[in-house]
Amino acid sequence: MTALANRPEQRTSALAEANRVRLGRAALLKPLAFSSTPESCRRAADLIEDTPELLASLTVGKFLDHVHRVGQSTVERIVEACGVFEGKPLGEITPRQRAALAAALRYRAGEADANRAARRHGNRCQDCGALIPAANEAGVCGFCAEQDGRP
């Protein structure tokens, strides 16, 4: 009879623990979805480098889905480039994979910053009119430079 008496208490404590984890994850992941792309990518990289216990069981793919403007195809490209299985929990990835994912997200943040600056300052390729970073001194995009054999 004592085993049955413990069940409601165990169930209540399990539900309380699940709720604590769910609310903690939401508090960590919500800023990723609702901040600007560069800020979201930087925060995600920080969380990957120093993964909190609440996120340790979350898969890499599900985590990256929360990053602003990162969809399924971008997730697939990132994990393939970094050599990480999309379904692997964040707490189980190797230090090399962790560093590669963080670097990929930081690169994406820098790319978003450059695109924002280009839109703001109106830097466009002289040949095709595509937006280019302000630091591009040649005045042409990478594609046009490659087609023309420019450095």
Image (cartoon, rainbow, N blue to C red):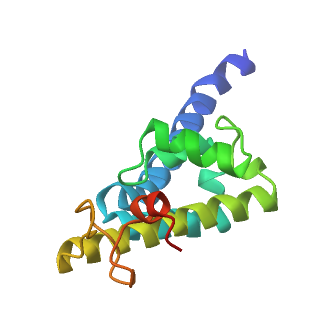
Q: Position of residue 117 (x, y in %)?
A: 27, 77
- Please tell me which residue lies in front, 70 or 13: 70
Q: Position of residue 147 (x, y in %)?
A: 46, 57
Residue 112: tell me if it is visible.
Answer: yes
- Please tell me which residue lies in front, 148 or 15: 148
> Which image quarter holds the N terminus?
top right
Q: Position of residue 126 (x, y in %)?
A: 25, 70
Against 86, is 114 above or below? below
Q: Position of residue 123 (x, y in %)?
A: 24, 76
Identified at 39% across, 61% down, the residue is: 144
Give residue 129's quadrant in the image. bottom left
Give residue 3's quadrant in the image. top right
Q: Which residue ends up furthest to the front in the rendered image?
A: 148
Identified at 72% across, 45% down, the residue is: 84
Does 111 sit left or right of 124 as displayed? right
Identified at 51% across, 65% down, the residue is: 149
Callout count: 0
Against 15, is 42 above or below? below
- Please tell me which residue lies in front, 149 or 98: 149
Does 41 sit left or right of 51 as displayed? left
Identified at 66% across, 34% down, the residue is: 87
Residue 17: tell me if it is visible.
Answer: no
